[in-house]
Amino acid sequence: PEILCTPLQELCLFSKQLAPPNTSIVDFLSRAIDPPSSIVSRSAVSLLKTIDALDTWEDLTDLGHHLVDFPVEPRYGKMLIYAVVLKCLDPVLTIVCCLSYREVFCVPASASDRRRSCALERAKFANGSFSDHMVLLRIFQNWQEARKQGRERQFCAQNMVNGAAMEMIMGTRAQVLAQLRASGFIKSKGPLDIKYVNTNSDNWAVVKAALIGGLYPNIARVDREHGVLRTVKEHKVQVHTTSVLNESGGTLNKQNLVERLPTDWVMFEEMTRVGRLCHIRTATVVSPITVAVFAGPSKIPFDALSDSHLEGSAGSDSEEEDVGPDQTATLKVDDWATFRTDSEAAQLALQLRVKWHSLLSKKLRSNKILTYTEETIITAIVRVLSAEEQFFGLTQPPGVGKRPYLMVPDLMSGRIDFSDNSSVDGSVSSVSSDGGLAGNRKKNDSASPNKSNFERFNGNAKNYEENPSPTPSVSSSVELQRANCASPFRYFVIKAGQLKFIDVSVVHKMWAFLPVTQNKIIQAYKGGKTVVLVFSIQGSGHFQGYARLTSDTPVMGDITLPDMATGHFFNSALPIEWVKRSNIPHHATRHLFNPYNDYAKVQMSRDGQEIEPTVGEALCQLWETIPWSSSSNGPLPHFQRAPRLVRAP
């Protein structure tokens, strides 16, 4: 049953919104036809309380209300919120999406030499950071580089990476980013834009602080006296052989492995048990101050800080000796994680923890710009984390905050063949012998007869891909203009009111636009772009086809033409040329997200909504790759032989 396949933490949060008042989550889930185990349900509810998604009475907290909206597990959503406040979103977002899709690597069942080679490759990606999370980040960054150069298959084979998983991660990344925008954590422009929330993305110490906020209580402590790792539930755990912390793949003595760790704290993704042995997977070494400030519940226990004296000073009657160098303090994060240090350092750490959680609580209630005092707190936290990393000899890997490339998930083969088929005598394209579309060459192309229109277009497309937008969130109007200038095509969604309007347009080769939409596409046409119009009937659940604008001069028809979006009547329209006319269901486009519309799905477009060029191209490519619907609304079969798009003169 589907209810047993859904992550239980997410299910519990959703159940809380549906459950009647005064009904516990466990009782509500027990009424299902195939209820999950009550023990597992209680464990999930307990975890949600631990991460502050639920309060003592199982009501949603401010954090919980936000976590319900994210399409990832609650703990991953908490990482993202921490990342937004700490201003290190991009690397955390990538790591979260990698963690939510667990099949990133393809580990062979045999060939130990290949396994060893794979472990060495992971160690290179870790770059001495003692972090499996760094490996995930580097894998995605390098895969994007390889994909940009067209060698992603070679990269995946060499590093045993699941290429399909990388495509899914990229799509999930865009979806989560869109939800962050919808929730108000990121603005399209201004002080809370994408650049602002990535101010500290290059600082690996800050990234780890955001990660531990969601991974808690999955932390382990190093017991150097006995040479073991301990967790809150297990007295002895081992690092999994696939972890970069276990560089030898299990041949090194476990005690020596623990001794090599630079700090006493390790956060991990999950713990598995095989017989009597427990292993932690996807682990990262963190500094003590990271645990002291960011791990644990948001509510500070009343006994969080307690002073004590070393032996020999308890019987002293001198007040001056009580504040001397012998005085120490115990800082308590929870019932298990405690720190013993000098009194001043403990008090400063506690104050920093209180300031952080107060700032976070305010951010959850209202997504307003941070004040100068709050910005100072973030700056102080960053400096403290960085200094602590240097003290323990943890390196700062370069390129942590490298912005990901703007790419569309490659779920289809080939590209759209927008050939330049215009000729001096005005002739149009013809049908090739293989049933495809073939265009006439211009006379000035005779110097290179072996170079096809397809190759010339792909050359333009290649230049566009080699200089992609540096960020997956093109926010400002200046950035949009630059992206548009890089591509010779501009794509717009046109909403039709009824099917008969499509038929009228097919017969008369024209379309009556809303005034706002018409001004927009005319401006694009005058800019020398090929204007591509993708049509969708409102409420139909399909895209009906796409056409190109052939002129910006209105056509005066012999009939009264309705405005195709509203049904109001006008006496002029713009000429268009239909390229494809058949139904493409919206669910076939669910992998396409439009950066020009806050990364919403392309199907969620209003009339006149512009589509980012690579996304628009992928959308039009669906008419080439998906079998045409037998219920096509197009009455004229000759549209399969419609001329290709040509660049605007």
Image (cartoon, rainbow, N blue to C red):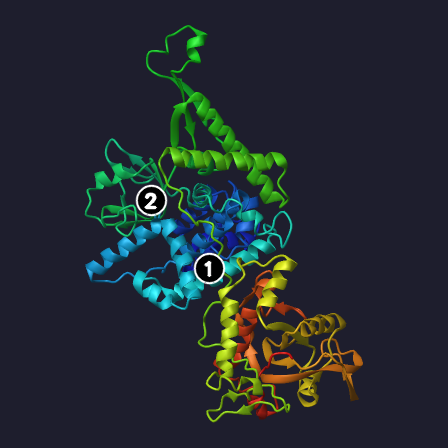
Q: CA distance from mark 1 to mark 2?
A: 44 Å
Q: Position of residue 194 (x, y in %)?
A: 57, 52
Q: Is residue 435 above or below residue 2?
A: below
Q: Which residue is mark 1?
A: 32
Closer to the chain start, of discs 1 and 2, is: 1
Hey, which quadrant is residue 305 in on the image? top left
Camera-nearest label, 1 or 2: 2
Q: Residue at x 51, y 63 (%)?
A: 467
Residue extending farthest top = 317
Exactly how many numbered labels are in the figure? 2
Amino acid bearing label 1 = Ala
* Label 1 residue SS: loop
Residue extending farthest front = 447
Q: Is there any visible trace of residue 200 in the rendered image?
A: yes
Residue 183 placement, left or right of 209: right
Q: Which residue is mark 2?
A: 130
Which disc is residue 625 wearing?
none
